Amino acid sequence: MTTSLSGISAHVWSTEEKRILVAAARQASKGWIGASWTLSFHEDSLDLYERPVNKHWPRDRGGRARLIACGAVLADLECAVRVLGWAPWSDLTSDALGFDRVARLKSVRRIRPTAADFARFAALSGRCTKPPPSVMAAWGRTVGKGCEAEGVRSRLLRPSQVRDLPRVGGQIIRKVTSDDSWVAFLVGTATEAREQLVRAGLVAQRLVLAAAEYGLVGNAFTEPFGTPSVRGTLAGISRAVGFPQTVVVVEEPREKPVRKGSTS
């Protein structure tokens, strides 16, 4: 511990805490953009930076997808901070001395981790802690409300509603299973400000983790919404919430094909 200007002891990250936080951030990269971020630890906080140069996303205009992916990393970091027994506080304002800083995360006070915190942390590595929902749509309505953030909303869509989305429905359908046993969350922002894009990724990752808790598989897709004209078109339809930035498809795990020469 160190003492802040107010005389209150400030938390200092231990070596083990740093290891856990880095591991949590890396879990997000498995489902999003790899190597699009970096962490910088300070005594009582850590900074999340985007990496503007990313060879994997040459068509990412303005770094939109990269910022959304950084939001997913932030969701995992907040989850890890809670399990470590601290209340996380994220500052998404721009840094005049570091324009590539996406967020500053601080541990503001001690809290006791709850069962929900541990379940969400287990979901980082894909561990299921709850039985699968009997009715996917009812589950989706409950989970969607609990994953929203300031200025970012999600709308639950059935497969038929996804197919009807102008200009993107066909792209999304081709990425999922052929049957209709899945649901999707359309994640939209009130504006297209930098902070809103980060929060869109945070909400999307919360939905992915919520799915993992129940033994479901969540995948987020940002590519269909990469063109401003597409987002503008979808912003005006009733099923969208603001400017659509990503869609999270939740489905049951697909059975892996049996290898030749092996038995199930």
Image (spheres, rainbow, N blue to C red):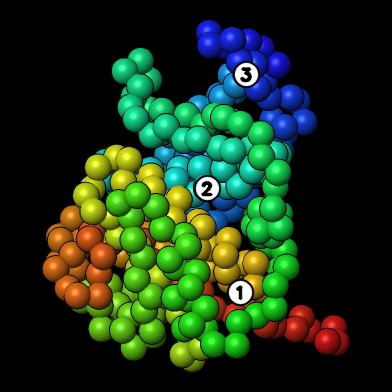
Front: mark 2 or 3: 3
Quarter the N terminus occupies: top right
Which residue appears farthest toward the front when viewing the image? 7
* Type of amino acid under label 3: Ala
Q: Which residue sits at x=25%, y=75%?
A: 239
* Type of amino acid under label 1: Leu
In the picture shown, does residue 111 fall above or below 177? above
Disc 2 is placed on an element classified as: helix
User: Can residue 214 be seen in the rendering of this structure?
Assistant: yes
Say whether residue 62 is left or right of residue 131. Answer: left
Q: How many angstroms separate mark 2 from mark 3 (CA)?
A: 23 Å
Q: Position of residue 148 (x, y in %)?
A: 41, 58
Of mark 3 and mark 1, the one earlier in the sequence is 3
Residue underneath mark 3: 10
Q: Position of residue 210 (x, y in %)?
A: 57, 65
Q: How many angstroms separate mark 3 from mark 1 (CA)?
A: 39 Å
Q: Which residue sits at x=52%, y=47%?
A: 75
Tag on residue 216?
Answer: 1
Q: Which residue sits at x=65%, y=80%?
A: 132
Q: Position of residue 15 (x, y in %)?
A: 75, 25
| Closer to us: 135 or 187 | 135
Quarter the C terminus occupies: bottom right
Of mark 2 and mark 3, the one earlier in the sequence is 3
Tag on residue 9?
Answer: none
Q: Which residue sits at x=38%, y=48%?
A: 199
Residue underneath mark 2: 75
State if disc 2 and disc 1 touch (CB < 8 Å): no
| Closer to us: 86 or 61 | 86
Tag 3: Cα neighbours inside 10 Å, few (<14), some, or many (≥20)? some
State if disc 1 and disc 3 touch (CB < 8 Å): no
Q: How many angstroms separate mark 1 from mark 2 (CA)?
A: 18 Å
Tag 1: Cα neighbours inside 10 Å, few (<14), some, or many (≥20)? many
